[in-house]
Amino acid sequence: MILCDTDVIIEFLKGNKETEEELKKIKLENIALSIITLMEIYYGALNKEELKQIKKVMENFIILKINEKISDISVSLILKYSKSHNLRIPDSLIGATALHYDIPLFTYNKKDFRFIKDLKLYKYKKT
């Protein structure tokens, strides 16, 4: 299983061919999203019609909700990295989800996560 960051899903929804190909390689049944990513995607919809279309696509992904352990990991990440690396709350929750489930995070914004100890970043081939 691979956890996809919001930026990856946005590129997928925009029809980015490289992102589509990479997600095909991972296979739909292996793609997970944090509930934070799901909310960010819904929040970014331009109107109700687009939201309806996005909701239909999101039904295909595994959604990982926040639990007590993820919350605890996220708090520790904020304490450790918010001042030194400007880690934001949504990113701490997404990173904590990947850490809790011990799965790689697929993100195009590696700078937002690469400093988190023990977080595995998914390696993709960018053309």
Image: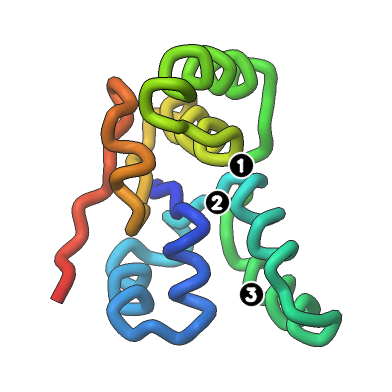
User: Mark 3 sits on what residue?
Assistant: 57
Q: Secondary structure at mark 2?
A: strand
Extreme-right residue of the structure = 48
Quick one: label 1, few (<14), some, or many (20+) residues within 10 Å?
some
Q: Which mark is residue 92?
A: none
How far is disc 2 from disc 3 in space, using C-alphas?
A: 12 Å
In this orientation, which residue lies closer to the viewer: 53 or 6?
6
- As drawn, is 117 to the left or to the right of 71? left
Q: Which mark is residue 33?
A: 2
Residue 72 vs 49, above or below: the answer is above
Residue 3 vs 54, above or below: the answer is above
How far is disc 2 from disc 1 in space, using C-alphas?
A: 6 Å
User: Mark 1 sits on what residue?
Assistant: 64
Task: Choose the circle earlier in sequence order: 2 or 1.
Answer: 2
- As drawn, is 64 to the left or to the right of 127? right
- The answer to which quarter of the image holds residue 16 is bottom left
Tell me the residue at 72%/82% (across/down): 53
Quick one: label 2, few (<14), some, or many (20+) residues within 10 Å?
many
Extreme-front residue of the structure = 83
- As drawn, is 46 to the left or to the right of 84? right
Q: Amino acid at mark 3?
A: Val
Q: Are marks 2 and 1 in contact (CB under 8 Å)?
A: yes
Q: Position of residue 79 (x, y in %)?
A: 51, 13
How far is disc 1 from disc 3 in space, using C-alphas?
A: 16 Å
